[in-house]
């Protein structure tokens, strides 16, 4: 639900008590993650690499925004989703989102942790 804590106003747009674009992007990405979660094997995961999004309409405080993702292309480890977000009145956003399958999330996360250890 859109509340004062997730509006454009918290990003510095004074008076804009509407669902913030960065949070719409996050909602749409989460829809893609949720769409493939049941298909992943133990230890697998995915990472987002690209999102092309259009925020088409404002959603005021008090309304609910939902997102639905459809897997539209698979090329090796790359997955492409078409995502639509709506409130109870209209479509508020659309996007094309790319994710890559990570076969071993533990190894991926270890590599990320090691990157933090490197100092110049």
Image (cartoon, rainbow, N blue to C red):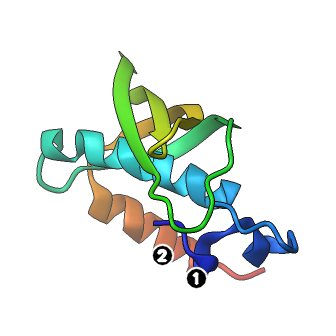
Q: Tell whether 22 sits left or right of 15.
A: left
| Residue at position x 48%, y 75% in the image | 113
| Residue at position x 49%, y 40% in the image | 85
Please give the residue where the numbered disc 1 appears in the rendered image: 117
Q: Label 2: state its secondary structure.
A: helix
Which numbered tag is attached to residue 108?
none
Q: Label 1: state its secondary structure.
A: helix
Across and down, in percent, residue 26 comes to 53, 56
- Nearest the camera: 22 or 91? 91
Quadrant in the picture for the C terminus: bottom right
Q: Tell whether 40 sits left or right of 15.
A: left
- Nearest the camera: 77 or 52? 52
- The quadrant where residue 67 appears: top left
Please give the residue where the numbered disc 2 appears in the rendered image: 113
Residue 3 seen in the current view: yes
Q: Tell whether 58 sits left or right of 79.
A: right
Structural distance between the alpha carbons of marks 2 and 1: 7 Å
The vertical placement of 61 against 105, above or below, is below
- Nearest the camera: 119 or 53? 53
| Residue at position x 43%, y 28% in the image | 81
Q: Tell whether 17 sits left or right of 72.
A: right
Q: Residues within 10 Å of mark 2 (few under 14, many from 20)?
A: few
The vertical placement of 62 against 53, above or below, is below
Q: Residues within 10 Å of mark 1 (few under 14, many from 20)?
A: few
| Residue at position x 72%, y 68% in the image | 17
The vertical placement of 110 against 88, above or below, is below
- Nearest the camera: 106 or 40? 40
Across and down, in percent, residue 91 comes to 54, 34
Residue 76 seen in the current view: no
Q: Residues at badges 2 and 1 in contact (C-beta under 8 Å)?
A: yes
Across and down, in percent, residue 22 comes to 66, 58
The vertical placement of 68 against 26, above or below, is above
């Amino acid at each position: 639900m859109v509340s004062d804590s997730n509006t454009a106003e918290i990003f510095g747009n004074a008076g804009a008590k509407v669902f913030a674009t960065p949070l719409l992007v996050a909602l749409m990405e989460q829809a893609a993650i949720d769409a493939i979660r049941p298909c992943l094997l133990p230890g697998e995961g995915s990472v987002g690499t690209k999102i092309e999004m259009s925020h088409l309409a404002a959603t005021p405080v008090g309304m609910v925004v939902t997102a639905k993702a459809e897997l539209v292309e698979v090329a090796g480890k790359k997955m492409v989703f078409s995502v639509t977000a709506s409130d109870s009145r209209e479509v508020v956003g659309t996007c094309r989102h790319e994710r890559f399958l990570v076969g071993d999330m533990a190894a991926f996360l270890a590599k990320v942790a090691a990157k933090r250890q490197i100092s110049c």
